[in-house]
Amino acid sequence: MVTKVKEMPSLKVIKRDGKKVDFLGTKIAVAIKKGFDATNNEAYTEESVNKVYRKVLDKIEKNYSDEKFIKIEDIQDMIEDSLRNMEFQDVLESFSSYRERRNESRKVFFSRQHKLAKAIELLSLKEAKEEDSKRENGNIDGNTAMGTMLQYGSTISKEFAKSYLMNKKFSEAHDSGEIHIHDMDFLPMGTTTCCQIDLTELFKDGFSTGHGHLRCPNDIMSYTALAAIAIQSNQNDQHGGQSLPAFDYDMAPGVLKTFKKQFKQILYDFLDLNGIVGLVKFDHIVKDIDKLKTMDIEVEIFENYYKDSEQVERIFRKAYDKALAKTDRITYQAMEAFIHNLNTMHSRAGAQVPFSSVNFGTNTTPEGRMVIRNYLLATDAGLGKGETPIFPISIFKVKEGVNYNPEDPNYDLFKLSCKVSAKRLFPNFSFLDSPFNLQYYDPNNYKTECAYMGCRTRVLGNVANPDKEIVAGRGNLSFTSINLPRIGIKHGKVTLGKPDMKGFYKELDEKLELVKDQLLERFEIQCSKKVYNFPFLLGQGVWIDSKGLKNNSRLKPVLKNGTLTFGFIGLAETLKALIGKHHGESKEAEKLGLEIIKHMRDKIDGYAKEYKLNFSLIATPAEGLSGRFTAIDKSIYGKIKGVTDREYYTNSFHVPVYYNISIKEKLRKEGPYHNLTNGGHISYIELDGDVANNVEAFEKVIRIMHDEKIGYGAINHPVDRDPVCGYTGVIGDVCPGCGRREGEGVPMERVKNAKLNECCGR
């Protein structure tokens, strides 16, 4: 703590912009202290700071006692002179370096003014369909007032980050299209990307959103309502999406509480109706019902209350059956409300629907099964006018011994999930038996079941804390993608006549090193923030190990549990540039593609080991980045057949969608990449026709995914809807539901391959 600061109210400081402000000695003291702190020299004390501070004040009092104004640059010169004369050389270097960087940053920032003004002009005067920046976030409406306001903030924030917070080489690499720093607009705020929320832990003692405390919920309707609120609240603290990794386990206690409540009430009503409620010690019955661990019981456990009365026995049995049936109906209503909420509620100043995902499928208890079944049925029913719900992105966890085989307890729910997905596009499917997921799986701990963000992000292994290799409470911190096709163009057959693989790997290593340093720089910014910057994520203990943190706690010990992720895009175009064929076309390309991505993974694993941080490799979603890289490369290298001749680069390691290949062969070729991309991955299969009428074929594709060791997979297919009668399915010229022809009245709604590919909404 700096002491003995002196103020001079008659003296004004002229800032760089010409503005005049009161002289405040405290600001000089703080600036000097920052210079000392930056050296990390423990030999320096508070007195060291005060000696320099007093020296500077003496100079000001001596030279400016009769002056009204002093320039900020003159004060900084005096600080440097004092440090030099008092032989604090390391502090001088630190202070001078910081001063120089700030001056350079201001020049850069103000030199961007024209560019910034142009960007704001485009945001103001163009529609989203005309301006790319208004479409950067898939679930923000860039045409709305709040959507445009957020885009203003985003545009300015990016420029500030480039000018003031980032090493120049990182911003230049981003602007030139060598890399893409995702969510750069949130870099100054230090937000993290996404989180897998442990609702069971959050609900245990209740939580606060900042406007009052919400107690632990006591029925399934409240459970789903609070789940939606938790997703909405947590998204306000992060720039990505929110995932519930064990929705069926989190909601099951709410089903049991609802059953107990219904059983007690219905039993009381029946007993009261027959005038015998006072004869059976009802208060004792209530206590016994409250002790139930499951609703799957034999009514005989209450025999002590009805052994002398057949009438009471009938009442018990009828009350139990009705309680089960009513609990089932209420659970369906709760799931329906949950889905409706997440497609209508907003976060981030009201401009964005939360990007939400739910994982489920492995809870075999009666309560868990009731959650899964009713969630699927509510998804199947659609929204209020029969629309297919986009959120939450549903992910059914497939596991042998649990739901994969006919003899498994949840096999019927797996079948139902296939039926619903064949109609509604969701759920997607994750595969716990794939070796890279199975290695963490503990059948006695559902928190070790791999869960995915809807986009593809995966967080499970934990180099930073091997005892916490679980999904709950963890997420991605940030990720940056490498423009792989450009490296391929520069060192490939398409440019040199023959591939220069030595040069290719040399440049790839340079880009990996660059991204590693950039991720570390951003990580330090994130760790410099305080708990109060993230009142829900950290303040309510959502992030792992953050419960009980003080406002001034260091964040690195908890944030280190997240992932720092390297991404890549356009492997297919990279291979075309290098050897003339992509991995769908030749064995040589298939082999080379795996070698390239394995090289990246090995290098990243080395960083993880060296820094004890969870560096990982993600198969980057296509999003807007795909077109951005392609446009820049096309302007540099021209239109190259099979490389830059389209408006996009192919999504991560995918075999190009335009290439004709069988389902099994596509999955066989893509499967090994799931093992290499530990930060996240997905494989898509495109189907034509109305698969809702052929669920067996749909299930067969899911089984191929399982056998080819896919980690996370989805099936795209056409989904049409008649807004007049509500019919959903493939519609030709005539609606099968009402016979209405295309062109008669309101147009048919036609969705082709409607999966939302944006990574966590960004």
Image (tube, rainbow, N blue to C red):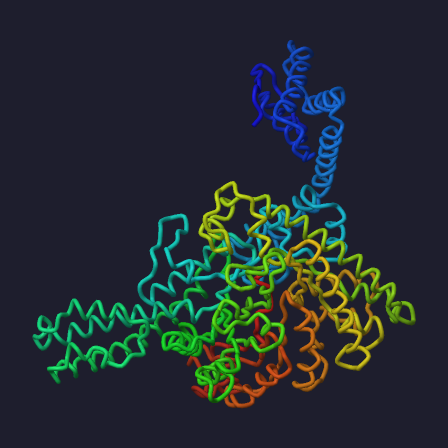
Tell me the residue at 59%/47% (across/down). Answer: 527
Which quadrant of the view contains residue 229?
Answer: bottom left
Judged left or right of residue 446, residue 510 is right
Tell which residue pokes out farthest to the right in this image. Answer: 497
The answer to whether 441 is drawn above or below residue 171 in the figure is: below
Measuring from the top left, give residue 339's x and y in whole percent: 43, 69
Tell me: residue 348, above or below residue 414. Answer: above
- Viewer-closest of 240 and 371: 371
For this orientation, the residue located farthest to the top is 66
* Residue 162 x, y percent position in the rendering: 69, 46
Image quarter hosting the N terminus: top right
Q: In this picture, is 378 found above or below 228?
A: below
Q: Position of residue 352 (x, y in %)?
A: 51, 58
Residue closer to the observer: 95 or 156: 95
* The C terminus - image quarter: bottom right
Q: Report which quarter residue 7 is drawn in.
A: top right
For the point 61% across and 19% down, the residue is 12
Q: Name the one closer to the observer, 655 or 31.
A: 31
Answer yes or no: is residue 117 visible: no
The location of residue 482, given as percent across then percent down, is 73, 61
Q: Number of numbered discs present?
A: 0
Q: Could one spot residue 676 in this view of the protein? A: yes
